[in-house]
Image (cartoon, grey):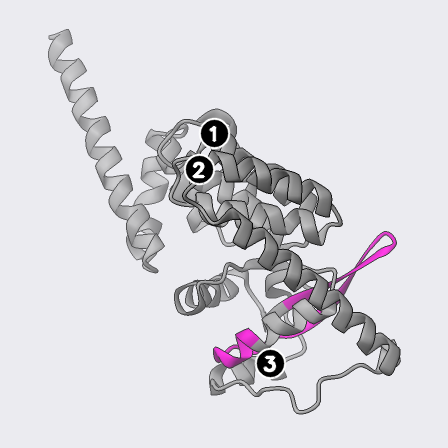
Amino acid sequence: MRLIIYINIITSFLLCQEHLEILIQDVLNGSKDSASIYLPMIEKQYPHNPNMLFLKGLMEINGKAAMRIFVELYNNHPTSEYGDDAVMKVAEFYYASGLYIQSAEWLKKMPLYYSRSEHIERAIKLFLNSLIVSGHRDTAIFYSKVFKKQFPSMDVDGKINKLLEDHEYSTLVSIEKTKLVPYNTQKLINPPKSSSPIEAEVDKRSSGKYSLQSGAFSLKENAEKQKIYLRNGGYSARIAELYRKTKVLYAVRIGYFNTSQEAGKLSNKIKSNLDLDTIVVTNK
């Protein structure tokens, strides 16, 4: 009798794992309908299941709340199937928020613990760039030499050189612009218009509790590049100045939304169309 009960439990658990995997893939492909139905039941039955936590994080619209779920997943199940995905989600949240030091701390876990992850190349690029834009150029060069030995098939030299060149170029352009034009009057002449009437309409609204944020940069030039990239993709974007102690960050934000769910729907579209991660933020 005990054996039968044990077999039933194992079978039920395996079916749950298979069902979770299907739901996760559905959400990653842009469909959340099934997950919204089954997730509450699965969470109630398996509250500490790592795959359930990953699905829950994917379903969470609020960026900070999702980040906390992914942190919980990593802390409690670092060797689970989605441990590396959780690390990347947390790092991307910090990166998009302009918190590059925190992002680098999480990205450093990838080559240490998940060197065979499918995300490793992107993780290394984001890690090196996080160090560079936060002013730790020498540290980035040091780690690039470490990664070159650890990943001999990866073009680490090419990556670090390109990142350094882009950063130096952006810095020079920013300095020249400051010399030529007063800071408070810098504007783009005839900025690109959104190719999407729907997104253009969203941009006209200057009120709304929520927006999407795709990045926060110490150099305005970099923020301008991402804004243009989004607009060329058909999404209205703007730059908001964020003041962090004595530092100013230039955040790229998209639209105004009354609910976080509304913002989340557009976030999925941007990820699908432009492969760009965004987080839901509250307008102040």
Given residues 128 and 188, the one toward you in this image is 128
Q: Which residues are magenta?
A: 229-252
Q: Which residue is mark 1?
A: 113
Q: Amino acid at mark 1?
A: Tyr
Count of marks, rendered view: 3
Q: State the image coordinates of residue 251 (x, y, percent, origin top left).
A: 68, 64
Residue 16 lies in what quarter of the image? top left
Q: CA distance from mark 2 to mark 1?
A: 8 Å
Identify the residue shown where x is 50% and y is 54%. Answer: 61
Residue 242 lies in what quarter of the image? bottom right
Above-or-below relation of 47 to 175: above
Near mark 3 (Cα within 10 A), the count class, few <14, some 14-19 or many ≥20, is: some
Regarding residue 228, the answer to whether it shows in the image is yes
Mark 1 or mark 3, whichever is nearer to me:
1
Report helix, strand or loop for mark 2.
Answer: helix
Q: Which residue is mark 2?
A: 84
Tell me, for residue 203, which label it has, or none. 3
Tell me, for residue 187, which label it has, or none. none
Above-or-below relation of 22 to 251: above
Mark 3 or mark 2, whichever is nearer to me:
2
Is residue 119 rendered to the left or right of residue 247?
A: left
Q: State the image coordinates of residue 9 (x, y, percent, origin top left).
A: 20, 21
